[in-house]
Image (cartoon, rainbow, N blue to C red):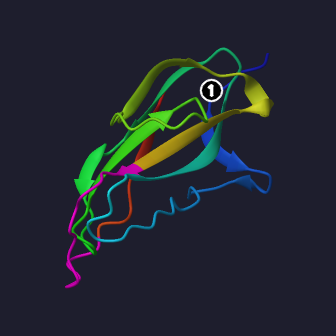
Amino acid sequence: NVTLTPRCEVFNTGGVTTSIPDLALSYTSFQTSASTGSTNFKVRCTNTLGYGLALDTASLTDGTTGLQLALALSSSATHSATPTAALSTLTGNGNAGQTYYVHGTLAANQDGSSTPGTPNKLRTLTISY
């Protein structure tokens, strides 16, 4: 008899990881265009296992700069400025895994703050299956 315990994990070429690469954005106070950036990560789940992904928030004020930031979780490399905290009804494909993206947007015409506040740069990604 064989018993299979289904599993999902964030991974990279080195194996299982607990962190996703940083999302790098630069911004100049009052700039007239939005600043955008993206980072990506891979998730592998047992073949045909249904799962979902969720960020702890899709809109926040950066504690260090005072800038409003929108995050969009996506299965597409095409940038999205629409805040999206969750993806559902995903299906595992085994060892190959699937690539997902976190797109970030700093809207135009923000002033920010030169007095650093409390950092809140870490976000939490939850995999439900």
What amino acid does circle 1 point to?
Pro
Q: Which quarter of the figure has residue 54?
A: top left
In the image, 38: left or right of 31?
Answer: right
Is 13 in front, or is 101?
101
* Residue 21 image position (x, y, % from top left): 59, 59
Magenta residues span: 105-119
Above or below residue 120? Residue 57 is above
Say if the magenta span includes residue 98.
no
Asked whether 107 falls inside the magenta stretch, the response is yes
> Does residue 100 appear left or right of residue 28 in this picture?
right
Give the camera-side residue of 25 and 48.
25
Relative height, residue 109 to residue 77 (above, below): below
The local crowd at label 1, few if under 14, some if 14 to 19, many if 20 or more residues have their Cα within 10 Å, is few
Q: Where is residue 6 in the image (x, y as percent from the top left)?
A: 62, 26
Left or right of 61 in this view: 80? right
Give the residue at mark 1: 6
